[in-house]
Every structure is written in C-alpha cells, then in structure tokens.
Image: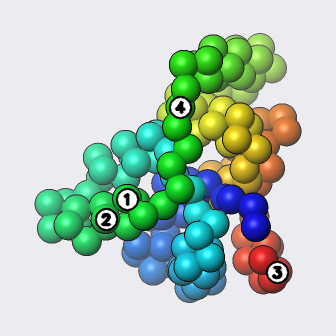
Amino acid sequence: MALILADTSIWIDAFKGKTPAIVSRMQTLITEGRIATCGPVLFEIKRGLRPAERKKVLPLFDALVWLAFEEHMWRAAGDLDASLRHKGITIPPMDVLIAAICLHYKVSLFTLDNHFHAVPALEIYSLQDIHESP
C-alpha cells in the first residue's frame, strides 16, 4: 500500500476532532502503517504543542514512517519555489519543503491547504478519497 504524508493541517484537524471523517481515516491509515511524516511537519506540530500535549502526541510521530530530507532535496525545493514564484504563486517555505519531499518520495499529500494544488505533479490525497477503500 502506498504511503501518504499527512500535512500539519490534517494533524491539527484530527487532534481537535473537527472532522470525524478525517479522524477516522487517519486512525485507519496509521493502523495500516501508511502515514508518513517529515521534518517540516514535525517542526510545525512541535511548535504548537503545549507541554502536556507533547507527552501524548510526540510518541505517535516516533512510530510513523520518516521521510528524510536529504541534501540534494534542498536544491530541488529551491528550484520548485523559484518555478512557482515565476508563475506568480507564493507558497509558505515550510510547505515548499513538504511538497518537495512528497515529490521526491512519490507519496501523496493529505492536506487541507489549497495552495498545494498549485504544485505540478504533486498528488493530493483529497477529502473525497476518505470515502474510498484503501
């Protein structure tokens, strides 16, 4: 089964229980071992956690598939950002890194952030996919 990188927006939604379908799907994908994470997502999650939440949340990330950001990927991320800006598209730098990781590892991105749709060749795992079987 294919890996899916869950973006910070999905984690926040799931932790807060905002969208029951996202909570349920994340539980299924985690159980199946299909959820991946990366440095930028972990960075964004850690910076928003309260001390009491850290003990509960961070061990979950230790159990996920880790997608490393290798040296050559910095160049690819810079090129991706430059090509988007040339088209008049500005995406937050952390999200450019997340997109570059997904493109490098050929994994889908589960996100609620629409700006990722502007990244060519990036496969988005959409809310409609929640209702499909894995």
Q: Which residue is mark 4?
A: 69
Q: Residues within 10 Å of mark 3 (few under 14, many from 20)?
A: few
User: How far is the residue under mark 4 from the one under mark 3?
Assistant: 30 Å
Residue 55 visible: yes
Q: Are marks 1 and 4 in contact (CB under 8 Å)?
A: no
- Residue at the image point whose x is 78% and y is 77% from the top: 134
Q: Residues within 10 Å of mark 1 (few under 14, many from 20)?
A: few
- Residue at the image point whose x is 54% and y is 19% from the top: 71
Q: Earlier in the sequence, mark 4 or mark 3?
A: 4
Q: Which residue is mark 2?
A: 59
- Circle 1 — which element? helix
- Circle 3 — which element? loop
User: How far is the residue under mark 2 from the one under mark 4?
Assistant: 21 Å
Residue 90 is situated, as x and y percent measured from the top left of the image, at 65, 27
Residue 64 is situated, as x and y percent measured from the top left of the image, at 48, 61
Nearer the observer, disc 3 or disc 1?
1
Q: Earlier in the sequence, mark 2 or mark 3?
A: 2
Q: Earlier in the sequence, mark 1 or mark 4?
A: 1
Kindly identify which numbered label has been placed on residue 62: 1
Look at label 1 and name its amino acid. Answer: Asp
Q: Which residue is mark 3?
A: 132
Q: Are marks 2 and 1 in contact (CB under 8 Å)?
A: yes
Furthest residue in direction left, as rendered: 51
Instruction: Out of 26 and 92, give the one closest to the viewer.
Output: 26
